[in-house]
Amino acid sequence: MSKIKLAINVKRELKKLNHEIDLKIIKGLPYRAEARRHRFLTTQFYTFSSPSRISFFRRTLHIFASFVL
C-alpha cells in the first residue's frame, strides 16, 4: 500500500475515532483507550503524509507523547 493510501486510511480512521470520542464525552464515559489510539493514529498520519517536513526532534516528541497517558 502506498503512503498516500495509508494516510487516507489513517485519516478516515481518525474521523471515526473522533466521532466515537465525542459521543463518549457527551455521555460522560471514559475515553482513555480511544485517546491513546487517537494519539497513535495522529503520529502515523503525520509520518505518512509529510515525513520530510517534520524534523527528527518533532517526530521524537510525538513518539514520547504517545506514552504519556
Image (cartoon, grey):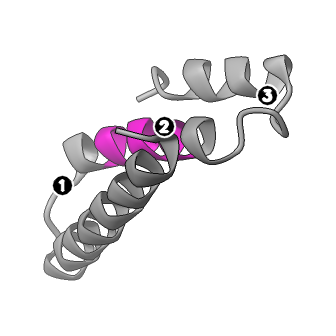
Which element is circle 3 on? helix
Residue 60: image quadrant is top right
For disc 1, the marked residue is 30
- For the record, the magenta segment spans 35-45
Q: Position of residue 51 (x, y in %)?
A: 71, 34
Label at residue 44: 2
Which element is circle 1 on? loop
Above/below status of 57 relative to 41: above
Above/below status of 11 relative to 44: below
Q: Main secondary structure of the magenta part?
A: helix
Residue at the spot 34% in from the left edge and 71% down from the top edge: 15
Callout 3 crowding tier (Cα within 10 Å): few <14, some 14–19, many ≥20: few
Check disc 1 and give the amino acid type. Answer: Pro
Q: Which is closer to the viewer, label 3 or label 1?
A: 3
Give how far apart the Cα atoms at labels 3 and 1 are. 29 Å
Check disc 2 and give the amino acid type. Answer: Gln
For disc 3, the marked residue is 58
In-front residue for pair 39/54 = 54
Q: Are marks 3 and 2 in contact (CB under 8 Å)?
A: no
